[in-house]
Image (cartoon, coloured by chain):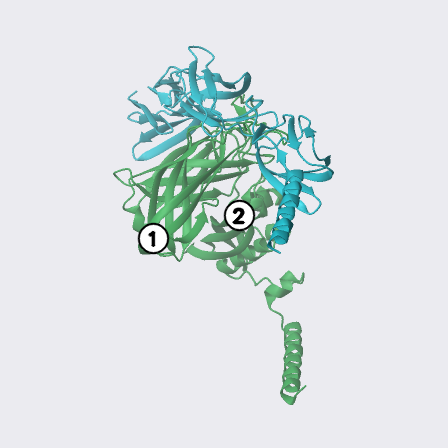
Amino acid sequence: MNTKGIILAVVVIAVTILLVVVGTLWPVPTAVSYAGGRGFLRASSTPAAAVDNLGDQLRLHHWGAAYSHLGNKAKFTESQFQHDITGYQLSLRTYATLESFDVHPLHQTADDADVRMRLHWSTVVGNYVTTRELKVVRNGDRWTVDWPFVKEPVVPPQVIPVNYLRWDVIYRGSGDDWGAQNVEAPHVRVVDMHPVQRAEGVVVLGELLNEDIVPAHVSVKATLLGKDGKPIASEDSSDKILPTLLPKQVTPFLINFPDATLSDVGSIHLDPISTLISASADPVIQMDNQKINPAPDASLTGQLVNESGQVVNIAHVLATFYDKSGQLVWVADQYIDRALLPQTPIPFNIHIPEDLARKISSERTVAATYSVGRMS
Amino acid sequence: MITRCALVICGLLFAALQLAAAQSMTLPSTIQAGSAFEIQTTGNGSGILYIVGPAQLLRKDVKLGGAIAFDAGLLTNAGQYVVILTAGSSTEQRPLEVLPANQPAHLTFLARPSRLPVSLHNGISGAVYIFDAYHNLITQPATVSFDLTPPTGAAQHRNVTTADGAAWIQLNSTAKEGMSKFVAQVGGVSSKRIIEQVPGDPCGLRISAQPAGEQLQLKTDPVRDCSGNAVPDGTVVTFTEDYNGTQSTVDVPLKRGIAEVKMPAHPGATISVASGVVLGNEIHWQR
C-alpha cells in the first residue's frame, strides 16, 4: 500500500468517527424521533408550530401522540381519528405514506387561527394530496389543533339485489389437436388516435372499443416509426387505460414516450391486445355532476357513486377530453384514495394541463374499480 | 499377338456383363404409401438391399435371382426414396416414389373465427388439409364440400376442389344469431366446427324517462341489432345527462335485454344514450 492510500484511509476513518460523535451528541430531532427517542416536537407556541407538530406525528404514525395533543379529542376516539386519516375501509389511504406536508396560515387572532394543511401522500400508484382546514386554538401559552373530523358515512341497512351478468371462461385443454378451436379472443378496435407533443415527450392518446359480446382484458402497445420506417421507441398503455372492457364499452388510453420528438415520427403503429377473461358487469359506477373548471387550476370535478352493494376499495377515474369538433385533446386520470361505499358519493378532481384547458369543450369519464377478492 | 489381346478383352467384357446381370433389379417407379410391393432381381448369390427415404431406412439381406416382397404398411411416408442393391463390390441404385394414398382418412379443418357478428360479408373462413391414413398430405385434386348450417334458416353449401392438398372458402355469416355447424367433408371423412354468430351493434337505440321521486328513471327499449336479434346481456349502454354546464354519465350493462338507471331530474336537462359507437335518441327533460 502506498503512502497516499494510507493517508486516505486514516482521513476516512477519522471523519467517520467525528460524524458519529457529532450525531450522538447533537442529534437531528427527526432522527431522534425515528429512533424512538423524544424531543422531536417543538413547543406549540404558535399555530404553525402546533400544526407542524401534528404533521410530524402523522408522518411517523404516532397516532396516540397526535390524538393526545388535539384540542377537540373529546368529540371522537383515537381509533376514529386514525381511521379518518387512513380510511375506514381498505383503500389507497390504508397503505399510503405521508411524504411531506405544508402549512398555510389563513387567518389568525390572538386566541385562534385558521390554517390550511396540505398532506402529500405517496402510494404504489403515485402521489396524491389531501387538504384539511384546521382550527388552531390558544390554550394558555400553547396552541392546540382542532381536528376537522369527518364522520364515516353510514350506509343504511338495506338489501341491494345485484343480478348483473358474470362471464366465466373455459379454455381449450392441452390435449386438443392442432386444428381444434380455442375460445376466440375478444375483438377490440382502436376508434380514435391522436399524438401530441408535450414538454416531457410524445404522448399518444386514443380510444379503444370492445366490439365483442364478451369481456376483454385490454392494453395497447404503440410503436413510433421514424420517417425511414424504422422503430424509434415502443411503449404500452400501462395503467392509463381501463383494464377490463365490457361488451361495447369504450376506454381512453394514454401512452407516454419520454424524450421523443413528434417531428421525428413518420408514423405510429398501434397494437391493441385483448384477452378473454372472467369478469362481472357489477359494480356500476355513476359519475355525477361532472364539471370542467376553466384555468387557472383547470380541472374536471365530479362525484363517483357506487350503485352496487359491495364496497369498492380502489377506483381509478379516466377522463377523455374533446375539442368543439369532437377531436381527442387529452386523457387524464385520478386514483381515488377512499373506498367507495354503496350509494355514497365520493368527489374526484382531475387536473387538466393549463395550455390544453382552453381547447377543451367536452369530456367523457369512465372508472375502473377494484374490490378486495375480485377485479372488474 | 493381336488375336490374343482381342480374346482377353472379350473375356473381360463377358465377365463384366455377367457381373452387371447379377446386380439387376426391377421395381415400380411409384407405389402408394403403405401398399405391398415387389422388387425383382436377377443374378446369383446374395446381396443387401437398402431403401432410403424421408425419415425411414430399410436394410434387407436378399437372395439374388428372385422377387423380394415387401408387406403392406412398410413404406408409409410419402416422398422420394432410393433403392440400393449391393452384391460383392458392385452397387446398383434406383429411385422409388412413394405417393400418398388416394383415400382420405384425416382432415385438418381450420375454421375462423369461432365467434362473429351476424350478417358479416365473407366473415367466416374455412381451410381444409386432406391426409391419408398415414398422415401424408394428399396432393391429388379432391372435392371438399363445405356446409354451414345455422340453427334456423337455410344452410350454405359449397364444393371446392383441393389444390396441393388444401381447399379453403369464405362464407357470409347469416342474419340470425346462434350456434352454426360448419362441416367439411371429403371422401366419407368429415370434420365439424361450431361457429357462434352473435348479435351485431345495437340498432335504433331508444330511451324513455319517467320521474321517480327526485330522480329520473331512464330505461331503454329492448335493445336489438339491425337484424332483430336481441343484444346480449352485459352489453354496456352509456347514459349521459347534460345540465347547466355539468354532466353525469353512467355505463350500465344490459339486464334482461334492457338498461335502466336513475339519474338526477333537472328540468332542462338533456339526456342521451349510446352503446359503443352507436348513438341513440336524446330526451330534453322539462318537468
Element carrying mark 1: strand
| Visible residue check, residue B113 | no
Q: Locate the C terminus of chain B by quadrant.
A: top left
Q: Within 10 angstroms of label 2, few (less than 14), some, or many (20 or more) residues? A: many
Element carrying mark 2: loop
Q: CA distance from mark 2 to mark 1?
A: 54 Å
Residue A300, image quadrant: top left
Please state which amino acid type lies under the numbered disc 1: Val
Name the chain under label 2.
A
* Residue to which mark 2 is pinned: A147
- Please identify the residue farthest to the left as the structure is shown: A325
| Visible residue check, residue B59 | yes
Percent position (x, y) of residue B114? 49, 25
- Please identify the residue farthest to the top as the structure is shown: B153
Chain A: drawing colour: green
Q: Locate the N terminus of chain B by quadrant.
A: bottom right
Name the chain under label 1.
A
Per the rendering, the mark at residue B71 is none
Q: Is residue A363 left or right of residue B231?
A: left
Q: Earlier in the sequence, mark 2 or mark 1?
A: 2
Percent position (x, y) of residue A237? 45, 45
Q: Within 10 angstroms of label 1, few (less than 14), some, or many (20 or more) residues? A: many
Residue depicted at 51% across the width and 23% down the height = A164
Identify the chain drawn in cyan. B
* Residue to which mark 1 is pinned: A265
